[in-house]
Amino acid sequence: MTLQTADLGVPGAFTAPGTRRSIGLFVALAALVALLMLSLIIGSKMMPPAVVWDALFHPSGDFDHFAIRDFRLPRTIVGLVVGMALGVSGALIQALTRNPLAGPGILGVNAGASFAVTVAIGLLGVRDVRGYMWFAFAGALVVTIMVLLLGSTRRGQSPVVMVLAGVCVGAVLGGAGSALQLINPDAFDQMRSWGAGSILGRPLDVVWPILPFFAGALVLAFAVSGPLNAMALGDELAVAQGVSLVRTRILAIIALTLLAGGATAIAGPIGFVGLMVPHVARWIVGPDQRWIFAYSMLLAPSLLLASDILGRIVMHPSEIPVGIVTAFVGAPVLILLVRRRKVSGL
Amino acid sequence: MTVTNLNPRLISTLALAAALLGAALMLAACSDGDDTPTATGTPAVTGTSTTASPSPTAESGTRQVEADNGTIEVPANPQRVAAIGNASLPFIDLGGEPVGVTEMRASTLALLPEEQKGTFEAAMNLGPSGGEVDLEKLASLEPDLILAQLPTSDFELIKEQLESIAPTVFFGLGTEWKTLADGLAAAGNLTDGLSEQKAEFEAHVATIQETYREIIDDTTFVMLDRYASSDPATFVITHIGCIEIAQDDIGLNLPEHAEGNNGEVQSFEQIGELSRYDVILYPVNAQGQATEPFAPVVETNAWQALPAVTSGHALGVFCPGNNSYGSVLRYLDSLDQALATLPSDE
Amino acid sequence: MTTRGVSTSTRSSRATRSPEVRRVDFGRRVVVVRRGWVAMRFEWRSVIVCTAVAVAVVVMSVLALTTGSYQISVSQVVSALTGGETGLVHDIVVEWRLPRIAAALVFGSALGVSGAIFQSMLRNPLADPGIIGFSQGSYTGALIVILVVNGSYLQLVGGAVLGGMATAVLVYVLAYRRGVQGFRLIIVGIGVSAMLGSLNTWLMLKASLEQAMAAAAWGAGSLNGVSWDQVAIGGTVIGALLLPAGILSGPMRQMELGDDAAASLGVRVAATRLALVVVGVALTATVTAASGPIAFISLVAPQIARRLARTAGITLVPAAFVGALLCLTADYIAQHIAPTPLPVGIVTVVLGGGYLGWLLFTEARRRL
């Protein structure tokens, strides 16, 4: 497979001056803050900003205050955290495989998490999200390590073999999981809703224990951004510059697994955010990973929150889980972009 | 390789022609096969109620039964009955003892009375669902009657095979529970048990109507539910399941609902809007605690602040199933007890 | 498609060789024999592999014919096949087991060929008809019939084929911009598939458990209840499609060298690609109509065949043989492994994915 760094970039972007990138970053930050506020205001019932303010800082027993404090605030925080993790993990996997079509799911993160949750629900009778989120996390980690081993050759890790291995492991686990679900209708029933992916109804005590992992992974991601930049120009050149290919790849994989695995443990499988946002970030800022990470950290939660808000509006007053909306928001953009730009590669 | 010398235009034309020919063949063949068998399979959808009328034909030792797959000739006194799909539990409830069944979900079986559960487990397990029944295993049981309730599309696939094993009485999923009980009793020669259950049901309904006449006339009720497959942080204002009996047979005053949908999905944010109802009914297990899927609703601050909850007007009702007289009778017991706890000032 | 350095070198040598071969071939057709020497080396192994797979297929068929939950002795099976049995034994052997085996072979090989066509055309080892949205589209169509209309089996088949075809056309049209380029086709396919996949998840959420489980079983691909009618119809269509597939395989191999190289050899790239897409999709559509979308065979059969036959590119015949064996074996396992039978598609995924993973692992090991 030769889906190399398909040169989807605008030529001008490579020369974008640092100031323009910084201004863009502030615009992205402003957009994110605006979406955070909208996420508190919009819902089954529109809340005026004054009510939101009161609910946050002078709460009373009012039903509107319950709605904001108990449901909208947690889902907004979950969206922010999960979005950031998905964005950066997507940027990492795309840098690592030099494949613009790779999402975090391609190394089997979602498959591992889903299978572990199916086992937890179907065989072990775990019913609470606080219980099976650890299964999801562990499943994602174990499967990614398996894929990493399968995809390793003498000359290090071949990204293409790794992707194939990810598909194989994902398929085996997916099949085994489906078999478990089909002979255990109760597990099937629960997995239907987990499989949709949602940031709603996750208590915040599901998020806190994952945060230290995210923080560590983010530090790792920025630490390997330099070597990844060097590797983007070719493995030989990178080695000549003193970059250790194996160490960079392994650190990057640890970081992206923690991020994607943690996000999936909290919210279930949410597609497209990790695939699309780094793409867009690269189109805006060019090939420098540090900038791509920074933009992904802001753009991904924006996309996730915007999708979530859209999911509340479309079928108002009922809602569509965000994991379903992201595809409908992301896919048309991707198709439009691929039609408009002169793409090569493959 | 020599074929490459052909005119490429010819190649593509040939390919297209062949594909079209193939499609045409398939269509023609499909519509051929359609003429004979499909005429029988549809009544379930159109909703024409099928009243089963056993009419013994003395000499052959068989009777005729009306079902969704036509008029079926069944043994006058079937000895070895296989009940697949959803037909198994209603058949057992009527006092039948099937030799083979397909799997039911564990959570459903847990609600059965012990002796019925024993009967179910004594039967041979023929497959994960009605549509995925192991036909050879079924044949090896040598049944003299097959009762089936499963999705119509699934049944049509295995209809011929089932009928080559034994007379097959089929009901679609949309069949009303009373009709289903009539049909299964007629086919399985269990009409004595059925009339007993019917009499008990009518007596119980009459008692409840008499005892709670005023409450039924002056109170607005709402029935809530939440399923394992529900989106997180949502619940349903439902009008299907056991509540149909409370509404249609007893006459509780429930909110208007649109025909056809399974209930109105509400976000937890909307719990406050439930203040408008006098009495809130919610699902509980046999021990009287909120069912596992519904428990998150009861835990919210908004629920605990509802006037109906603080004043003791939120009633847990146990619904062990709504597709057989036995389980419906147990539901009526539970409803009776719940209504009795309403404060007398009502 | 090149997954490793090793095959890249094989390919580049082919790439330099082929134009030359063509030039010889151009004037005198007899030279085919001379060129054949190079081809023979590959072909020999292909022939051996195909023979071995065929033997395995026969063994599996005998096994599938003689074992089952209903106890039938080998002599009874033989007499049933020769018309010596009546009643249930005859029905089970001749009307249930035999068409099921035939269906596994016919549909499995069709999926293998279909996958081989797509992987060769897109030069991508992960390509199958799913890539242009066919699988998700047909699942959407079937789900709407099962969940919304509560329709008959025939409506389900219609919905599935219609959904799949409409999606494939949509993807093709969206990817069309002065010709269809492989990369753009893949990205558009991923986008549309993702949307439909989400829609499918949502439809499943809104269904009752029985409906959702029936839909899931259909979506996994099941041979339960397959009859001679389905095999005959499906087999006829597939047979009719294999002819153009064979004719197209020549230009297809040339297009593996790149669009420009193929065009310089006189291949009409755009028309050939459209024809390949149509044949590939039609093959998958036929299988989907008869048995639901049996997953993963189209993806792994060409890969396994390529590794067994050690050919540089994707070849149709070994892929067809491997596809047939995979489908038959998977169905046998699906009927016997669990206490209750499973849809075949679940096992094809585990079996095919597992075997391909193992091949990858040993390949990587060999290079250690």
Image (spheres, helix red, strand yellow):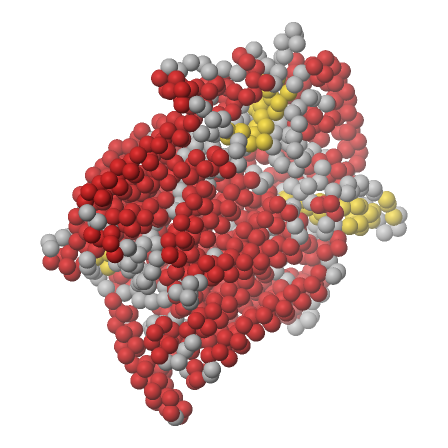
Residue at the extreme right: B58
Please say whether residue C17 is visible from this viewpoint: yes
Q: Which residue is at 53% across, 53% downward?
A: C139
Q: Is residue A327 left or right of residue A244?
A: right
In the shown orientation, is residue A280 left or right of residue A231? right
State which quarter of the image contains the C terminus of chain B. top right
Residue B139 visible, this orientation: no
Which residue is at 63% across, 66% downward? B26
Q: Quadrant of residue B191?
A: top right
In the rendering, at what x and y percent does residue B248 appear? 72, 27
Residue B204 or residue A200, whichever sits in front: A200
The residue sitting at 77% across, 29% down in the picture is B198
Q: Quadrant of the N terminus of chain B?
A: bottom left
A1 or C293: nearer the eye? A1
Q: Residue furthest top?
A: B345
Compare residues B272 and B346 and report the one nearer the observer: B272
Residue B279 at x, y percent in the picture: 61, 17
Question: In the image, residue A344 lies at what x, y percent?
Answer: 32, 62
Q: Picture coordinates of residue A135 (x, y %)? A: 37, 38
- From the viewer's perspective, is C44 left or right of B109? left
Numbered-mark total = 0
Where A279 sits versus B30, above or below? above
Of residue B183 and residue C221, the one placed in the foreground of this image is C221
Instruction: Please tell me which residue is depicted at 80% across the width and 40% down the height of the picture.
Output: B51
